[in-house]
Amino acid sequence: MKIYLDGKFVDSADAKVSVFDHGLLYGDGIFEGIRLYAGNVFRLEEHLERLEYSAKAILLKIPLTRKEMSDAVCETCRRNNLRDGYIRLVVTRGVGDLGLSPWLCPNPSVFIIADKIALYPPEHYTAGLSIVTVPTRRNSPAALPPTIKSLNYLNNILAKIEAKQAGALEAILLNDQGYIAECTGDNIFIVHKGRILTPAASQGALKGITRGVVFDIAGELGVPINEQNLTRYDVWNADESFLTGTAAEVVPVVKLDGREIGTGKPGAITGRVLAAYRQRVGTEGTKI
Ligand code: PXG
């Protein structure tokens, strides 16, 4: 496998970053997880825009222009003869002496991994997920804005551990006010009386690219969609629920905290959204 690392393509065995990289020492950096479908990178411009917004928020200067970054992503896919896969784009603060200050690091580091994707088992989509609410709260936007896709994922990892310990594959994290924020690596939606509802990003969610596509799809399908504060009670009493993310795409949720959602089977609107999503990923995108 060939990895893009600071302007060069190197073998994965040689794709190494320093122990002095502040991305490793302090989680000081940002990333994107992107999908390649049939030789087309899905929503590449939106991912690169979000990367730039994350960089701005942490005062990190990405050493590549948008066009150079886009070319580097496509070239990494081509060098690996990849047609379908997963692209991990990371920008770290770079190498610097010990100490929190980003000014210790003159050169941010950029690397891009393009690999095969381990797809979720099909039964997740046919049977739906059973998930739980976990005690760990989502980072407060006033402390570490969840809209920054940063290398600090410990908040999400703690929630993932709690989900696993409770025998579930995924966790809902509440925000510091007790409203639903998101899951560990996915946004959450419910369907109630024919409307699709999801928490606003200001409630502690990442502005997911897949989430944005669901807004487009809902418009196209003529299903009303709104951002709204949601509680666990709202999910328990929803007709349907689903999660969205680059890796998971659109996955039905059929149980939360031991309460069946709707019929306890993946819902009809969820099915239509998933079908429309799969149609889009097969036809849109930036040709590598
Ligand atoms: N919330 C969080 C906290 C995420 O990390 C999403 C929502 C969904 O966003 P997108 O833009 O993907 O619709 C994410 C996405 C990985 C991986 O390798 C993580 C994500 C996406 C792809 C891969 O862990 N997180």
Image (cartoon, rainbow, N blue to C red):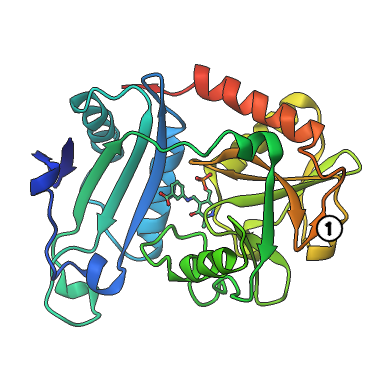
Q: Where is residue 21 shown, x and y percent of the image?
A: 17, 66
Residue at x-position 83% and y-position 53%:
260
Q: Where is residue 144 shown, x and y percent of the image?
A: 48, 72
> Is residue 260 rendered to the left or right of residue 56?
right
Residue at x-position 42% and y-position 65%:
153
Q: Is residue 235 visible?
A: no
Q: Quadrant of residue 22?
A: bottom left
Would you call the spot at circle 1 few (<14 residues within 10 Å), some (14-19), or many (20 or more)?
many
Which residue is under mark 1?
A: 236
Quarter of the image with the C terminus is top left
> Is residue 253 rendered to the left or right of residue 187?
right
Compare residues 158 and 99 and report the one nearer the observer. 158
User: Does label 1 point to a residue whose CB lies under 8 Å from ligand 1?
Assistant: no
Q: Quadrant of residue 176?
A: bottom right
Q: Quadrant of residue 221?
A: top right
Q: Where is residue 226 shown, x and y percent of the image?
A: 77, 47
The residue most toward the bottom is 99
